[in-house]
Image (tube, rainbow, N blue to C red):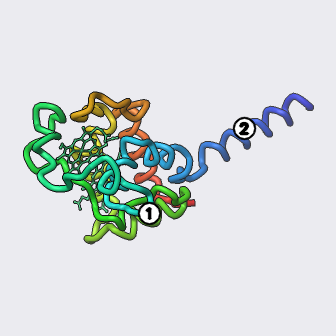
Amino acid sequence: MKALLLALLLLAATARAGGETVKFGDVLNQKFHHPRCLNCHQFNSARHQGRAFNSHSARYLCDRCHSANLTGLRHGEWMAPPEEMDWTDLDARATCMLIKRNLDGDDQAANLLAHLLGDVRVRWALDNGMTPGGRFPHVPGGYAEFSRQAREWVGDGMACE
Ligand code: HEC
Ligand code: HEC
């Protein structure tokens, strides 16, 4: 009888764990806050001493140094987002809300997934990390792990918390 109860309890626990919604903070938030993503997203932020206010006196013509043969990106693709897209000091929930707020279009889930899986800069951060100053460590787990986790999160409803 005891064993049966225990088995039932275990079953219930597994069912609950399996049915839990995937949240942004589970695994993705940590990756968004990896320096390969952050250093570009905070580029134009004075508050966080982004590169534009720090190591980079030349803020234009990024490709002159971040050339295609270094980054693997095409001409014009290496650029930094506006300051509003700097999530440096935001927690998981706020980071999640920010990237969702910036989304437009009818099919937000498809748009966000297309960006996360298809954007060349995201891909660079996940698998490459090459700069004119040498190669910086890419996001651990690379594209393979990130794309699986992004699919799970978006497929489960893009929950922020
Ligand atoms: C080389 C600079 C650079 C790197 C590195 C970079 N991004 Fe971005 N990111 C951008 C730019 C530029 C935009 C704005 C693109 C646009 O407006 O089309 C952007 C936009 C985004 C958006 C918003 C999409 C939207 O429509 O609001 C998300 C989400 C995002 N990046 C995630 C990431 C993640 C995650 C990483 C790291 C794995 C990363 N980015 C690395 C430059 C970068
Ligand atoms: C004069 C050459 C030069 C120009 C022009 C240049 N960069 Fe850089 N960039 C570098 C060097 C060298 C590094 C490595 C040293 C460092 O991290 O500051 C670097 C590093 C970076 C990093 C840090 C990457 C990381 O993941 O840590 C970002 C982001 C960046 N540059 C963005 C830009 C953007 C955006 C532009 C154009 C608005 C630009 N750079 C223009 C030379 C340049």
Depth order, front residue of 94/53: 53
Instruction: Measure the alpha-carbon separation of dots 1 and 2.
Output: 50 Å
Depth order, front residue of 8/22: 22
| Residue 142 image offset from top left, x and y in percent | 36, 32
Q: In the displayed image of the protein, which residue is found farthest to the front?
A: 57
Q: Is mark 2 on a helix, strand or loop?
A: helix
| Residue in view at x 41 percent, y 56 percent | 49
| Residue 56 image offset from top left, x and y in percent | 26, 49
Residue 11 numbered mark, or none: 2
| Residue in view at x 42 percent, y 42 percent | 35
The amino acid pointed to by label 1 is Arg
From this view, report whether residue 8 is shown above or below residue 160.
Answer: above
| Residue 53 image offset from top left, x and y in percent | 33, 56
Circle nearer the N terminus (1, 2): 2
User: In the visual, does 32 lie left or right of 89?
Assistant: left
Label 1 C-beta lies within 8 Å of the nearest ligand 2 atom: no
Q: Quadrant of the C terminus?
A: bottom right
Depth order, front residue of 56/129: 56
Residue 47 numbered mark, or none: 1
| Residue 59 image offset from top left, x and y in percent | 20, 55
User: In the visual, does 8 lie left or right of 27?
Assistant: right
From this view, report whether residue 55 is shown above or below residue 106.
Answer: above
Between circles 1 and 2, the one closer to the viewer is 1
